[in-house]
Amino acid sequence: MLKRFIERVSKSKKPDASRNMFGLSPYKWKPVDPKEKGKRQVLYGLCRGCMQGDCATLVYLEDGIVVKTEGNAEAPPTYGSLCPRGKSELMGMYNPYRIKTPMARTNPEKGLDVDPMWKEVTWDEALDIVAERLRKVREKDPRGLVLCEGWGQRDTMLRLPFGQAFGTPNEIGSHGALCTVHYPSGLVHAGYPVAIVDLEYCQYHITLGRSLGPNFATAPGTRKFARAIERGMKLVVVDPRSSYEASKGEWVPIRPGSDLAFLLAMAHVMLFEIQEYDMWFLKNRTNAPYLIGPDGNYCRDQKTGKPLMWDLEENKAKPFDAQFEDIALNGTYLADGVECRTGFDVVREEFVKYTPEWAEEICTVPPETVRRIAKEFVEHARIGSTIEIDGFTFPFRPVSLNTERNVTNRRGGTYADLTGKIINMLVGNIEVPGGCLSCSYRGPIMGPTEDGTVRPAYEAVPKPFKFPPDHIGLEEFYPHQHTAPHIAIKSILDPEKYYLDYHIEAYISVGGNPIKMNAQPHTYVEGFKKIPFVVSIALHMDEPAILSDVLLPEHSALERFRVAAFYPQHQSIDDEVNGLKMIQLREPVTPIFNTKHVDEIFTELAERLGILCGEGGLYDHLNSNIDWVDKTDGLNMNGEYKLDINRKYTLEEIVERQIRGWPYSGGKGLKDLKEKGYIAHWKPRKEFYNYYYFPDDKTRHPFYFLGLKKVGDDLRANLIKHNISFPGVDDMDYVFDLYRPVPHWVETPEFRAPEGFDLWAINWKTPYYSSDPGNVAGNPWLAELYTKDPYEAVICLNPVTAKRKNLKDGDMVIVESQYGKMEGRVRVSELFHPDAVGVSGNYGLGTIQSNPLNRIGPNFNTLLSLDERTFDGVSGGQDTAPRVKLYKKEVPK
Amino acid sequence: MRYAMVIDLSRCVGCSTCTVACRAEHGTPAGVSYNKVKKYEVGRYPTAKMKFLPILCMHCQDPACLKVCPTGATYRREDGIVLIDHDKCIGCRACVVACPYESRQFLWDIRNYYPGHVPTPYEVLKQKDFERGTVVKCDFCLQRLEEGQLPACVVACPAQARYFGDLDDPESEVSRLVADYRGTPFREELGTQPSVYYVKG
């Protein structure tokens, strides 16, 4: 039907070349509605300038025009402060490059530089085309639909149940493949998405490959950071660049991509040189004393099947939950005739070779620095101390080491994160005041399995294996994956190679742009071109939009009605938000274009498809879904407030029920929420630290990662059973080397890059460019800042390296990895490790109909790899620091 | 009453929220900014650091700009705020040259935010406040002060690095900060007696 439609509207066999190309001529704004003249209005807002999405704002209007967004001084978590993106939000709304009305392509040829020859259509026409096409896909095989979500659209509650009602398993994220930071926190803390630092009490914080707030100027993070530094917290930043945060503490330069070596060495120093541990924690709250047999599994009590520990006083092995006189942390013992060692010894033995001298060869950090930092970390941990909060006595461990994406994202990255957990566990700082906390649901989530260890949660729960696989991102082969757009695009291009027995027939883009924001843009373009039907719920003419068949234009952030539950902070917490449960309101600005709310679009599509109501429909799934991150503390359809699945609802009606059913609303509704823009409930502070719910010896964190080994063993058995190799990797040992229960050194392929690739490209988020909700690169207010910032959108080089390569400030250079190349202007700077080539944000690429700002600047992601051999096999994470070569661009005279 | 600002350089993280907050408050045209954050580096690898210096109009007590203004458009209030009367400004730009802090900008043209496009509805509203051929600068958010609010840059700063108040009141926060931390103006030796002080830099 789409083909007939295209032919009909174009009225000829060839596309109509006389149509005015989108974005080419200046947009004529509609004049202000005379009724609005003289009016002044203030709305409650909720910023969506970055991934956080929880900064409370006030949106001021004059004459019906948004004139300013300001932080809401009365509201947590920002109490009036904001960031450059939040302050620039209105320029994202008044953006002439936005998609202003539904459009359908008339030119069958697709490409980033090919004019689709858009034809404007009505909403009914557009939705009819899309629904009709999706109906056919669903009839043939609902797996044929991919829904790709991303940070550009976080204001939807109906996307997930739409996909469920449709029957596709293929909801993928465009984000996250370069930020696979979730598995270890799900395994050790039962938390999600990451583990963060308690900035209220922490005295010594070591941070790697991440931001606490200032690096990309999140307002809540920056507030907490400033207070912690002012009260004297010592900050150690291990990073190839002297970042905003490193400049406020101690900078420890490190070769890019080598953090695993540093972490292994720091753990070595703690295990072999300092040897001061939180013995009580290790013996009573970890599986370090569990006895491990020669096969790497727990030695188990014959009667009960429970893992054994050794009692030094009674001189025998007993089930872990028996009464012990003195638990052995070390030693080799005979249990039921089998020689077993403690988990602690097994782990420790692996680390004997990871001396700081060994590590220096790899990461360039001087051995004395590793030793000093390890010593300071242990000293500041105040092992044995306690603190009373709300009458409850907690262990007090005011230190934390935290790692995120620039550490985890390469082969071995999961081991690096797990080694960080080991370092933390040696001083007993998990989920206690001052220490290392997961940033998700606060409550009794760290409860033990039958084996006595923390029940894994979130991404530490392996996805089940199935062959042939159903999931386009092959979660069957990467059971701990985060998101896998990079695997999905390869499966789309070559389904047979990836064992899929179906094809992708349709793709809906919902705020995700994997073409620009992942790797190898032109591979993604080929994948998109292969999909017969592509729809964008589109804000502006980005890469997925220009390759779409139909554009369904959506509201900008300011125009979207939204009520959201506040998640505990993503980077750090302190007393400003400790214990806070909150729901926040965004009152929408009247839309200026012919756009719809994303959830209106899903409602309309679902209704046309006949999957909105009834059993198994969208509303049915919405009723039974529980918030993934915040569980029962999120906004769910609870009890009497569940929807009648047989009638249609407006978004406000659904939200009203969510608010009333929220456990902390006290029965209030939307009208009450509109009074202050938020409803807050403060839980006792003691309930914020998850230690509270399973204190003392009531649960044990994994120190010896048997869970990882088990998943690897099961996956290996499944590959053998089906006589298949790991997709994209012939040698399965290469992958299973990453599933061992004790972290160990593994090389990334970049370490063995061919000669000539002598440097390492690195990337980071900035105050102007964190992720890309609302097209930050095209925002003219932000562009005024980033074009003047000396370190933004340039190729940063250490002076020694620049001299060696005969380069100076301003030279135009090509940066080339084994996978792609890009160009930019050199900035010589002492802030960078000599091996690093530093490129911030992700500028460039764009389309022939984009804001011209989207076409300029270095496109870092072009340098990254889609080769499975470069991934971390456990998380599926891609390598964010490829080896590169750098040379002057020859400019014709 | 002497209005003054104190900027805590140990807190400032160089995010430029202040710059955008100022733009958002006043709707300055493209390329015009009353607040700038200088970003630079000190030291050498492996101990180099980034440093940040937010600069705005210093509202000097003995302003160089005022001395050179031929029409009296630039004037200083009792409370220390230095303002420009745009009815009197003839755009000679002597003040732009005279100001040692580069705080003033001349409106050669009113440019639109989106090059090649017409003004957005926001700009249509805000551009009325600007006259081509005159000079503009920070006014310490006088309109906000009159409504009992602090300047936009002060409120917006996520690191809470900016303070504002009455330097004539020895108990005010700004007075205490200047006294306790030996706050000094930027390039104090130039002698214009700025009302913006920096601490912990």
Image (spheres, coloured by chain):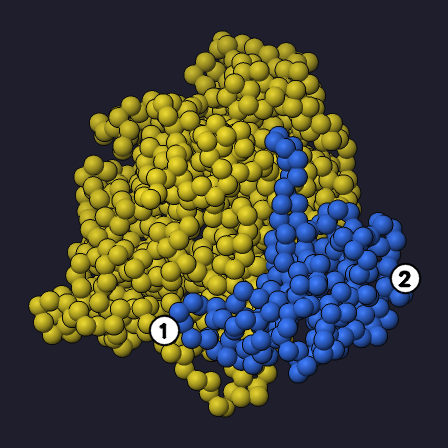
Residue A39 location (% of width, % of height): 57, 86
Are there few (<14), some (14-19), or many (20+) residues within 10 Å of tag 2? Answer: few
Q: Is residue A93 left or right of residue A399?
A: left
User: What amino acid is at disc 2?
Assistant: Glu
* Residue B31 seen by the camera: yes
Residue lying at 50% horizontally and 90% vertically, measured from the top left: A35
Residue placed under numbered mark 2 in the picture: B171
Q: Which chain is blue?
A: B
Q: Chain of mark 2?
A: B
The quadrant where residue A436 appears: top right
Q: Does A336 appear above or below A809?
A: above
Q: Does A762 appear above or below A70?
A: above
Residue B94 location (% of width, % of height): 67, 68
User: What amino acid is at disc 1?
Assistant: Pro
Q: Which chain is yellow?
A: A
Residue placed under numbered mark 1 in the picture: A26
